Image (tube, rainbow, N blue to C red):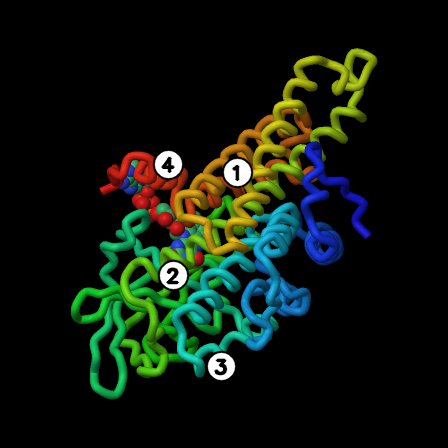
Amino acid sequence: QDTFEHPDFYGIDDLLTEEHKMVRQAVRDFVKREISPYIEDWYEKNHFPYEIVRKFGELGVFGPTLPQEYGCGGMDYISYGLMMQEIERGDSGMRSTASVQGSLVMFPIYAFGSEEQKRKYLPKLAKGEMLGCFGLTEPDFGSNPAGMVSNFKDMGDYYLLNGSKMWISNSPKADIAVVWAKNEEGRIKGLIVERGMEGFSTPEIHGKWSLRASITGELVFDNVKVPKENLLPLADGLSAPLKCLDSARYGIAWGALGVAMDCYESARKYAMERIQFGKPIASFQLVQKKLAEMLTEITKAQLICWRLGTLKNEGKATTAQISLAKRNNIEIAMNIAREARQIHGGMGITNEYPIMRHMMNLESVVTYEGTHDIHLLILGNAITGIPAFK
Ligand code: FAD
């Protein structure tokens, strides 16, 4: 069992049920066993451990909030959040794999798919027998997905899909891609594209200094014939992919908290053990200031996550509330990682400690699923009713 004592200064554990705590412990033990011993090596080698997909499936972290009748967990959003927290405490890239599969592939199939699509894909995705990816971003359309140029034409018996997607997590290994493209009327629709369809390729993107244990690629569609039954019948317009992103961003808010906790715990332990000027560096006021501020920010982020989780459970969480949580928690995690790096002195730059890896990972997390500034503008819009990003 992992003996990691997570910071819980305000007794937030008292707000959790026994099931929440069991779920958290199970994922924590898994991360300790299956991820932490290997992650620095995977990271250095830029290796995506494909076998983790099956193991995540067995653990039940793919789409855990979706109904059991499709082979999913039927759990609440606090359990889901705690899972993401624990996985990302291990590594943001591992959490990305889980987020994409659950929130960006299984969720749209569940929310916008036909009954046949749900029965065909969800149980396999839940078990990790199939890996999926989510294609929204294009080379020329990142923050502004409405401008996308990927498109499909109705050819009578099938749809003909053309275009490309960029920065797609899991894509080089994915069996299916949930792809957002415009129809002949310019409406954004969702299509399930399967590996092996002629004209469909998924080249890997190399040279990332962030999320190095997660695999990222492109999606290229060159006259791909997509069967008509692969259209998600209930997805119409940009609001459909944005709903998926709401679900993933909620998990990211919890995940960033996991990173912050890991950096804080590592720094706290190091500060207690490292002796300079004849005493532990934890006895110096400036180091205590860093630790105290870290704990303060972690506690605030925990309260945000917990409350947002209860709102999600009641179906009341808004996009702007999720933006606030994602934006805040990543920012505090980045600041905490940087301060923790300083507390570790020179050792902080090595892979003896997780800090630099977390720091580099957060550079992707702060950009994907809506950049830091775009989330600020979503909040600005919620406050003023004036969309400043257009
Ligand atoms: P741009 O949109 O070009 O933004 C560049 C800068 O301009 C940013 O700082 C941004 O905040 C700023 N900016 C843009 N517009 C405005 C504005 N109106 N006002 C103020 N500032 C603005 N996408 C997927 O679809 N699926 C995935 O699985 C996926 N995985 C990813 C994995 C990784 C590792 C990375 C790095 C990205 C991934 N993405 C994925 C893409 C990600 O969502 C985009 O990178 C992100 O939306 C930003 O788009 P961009 O990189 O094109 O930046």
Q: Which residue is mark 2?
A: 218
Instruction: Give me the C-alpha separation between circle 2 and circle 1.
Output: 28 Å
The answer to whether residue 357 is left or right of residue 190 is right
Labelled pair 4, 1 in contact (Cβ < 8 Å) = no
Identify the element where label 1 is drawn: helix
Up the image or down, 145 lies above or below 352; here it is below
Can you give x and y, in whole percent of width and height, for residue 274 in the image?
78, 23
The tally of labels here is 4
- Amino acid beneath label 2: Glu
Q: Position of residue 301 (x, y in %)?
A: 57, 36
Q: Which residue is mark 3?
A: 120
Residue in front for this viewpoint, 118 or 27: 118
3 vs 2, front mark: 3
Distance from the alpha carbon under mark 3 to that under mark 4: 39 Å
Q: Is residue 259 above or below residue 317?
A: above
Q: Which of marks 4 and 3 precedes in the sequence?
A: 3
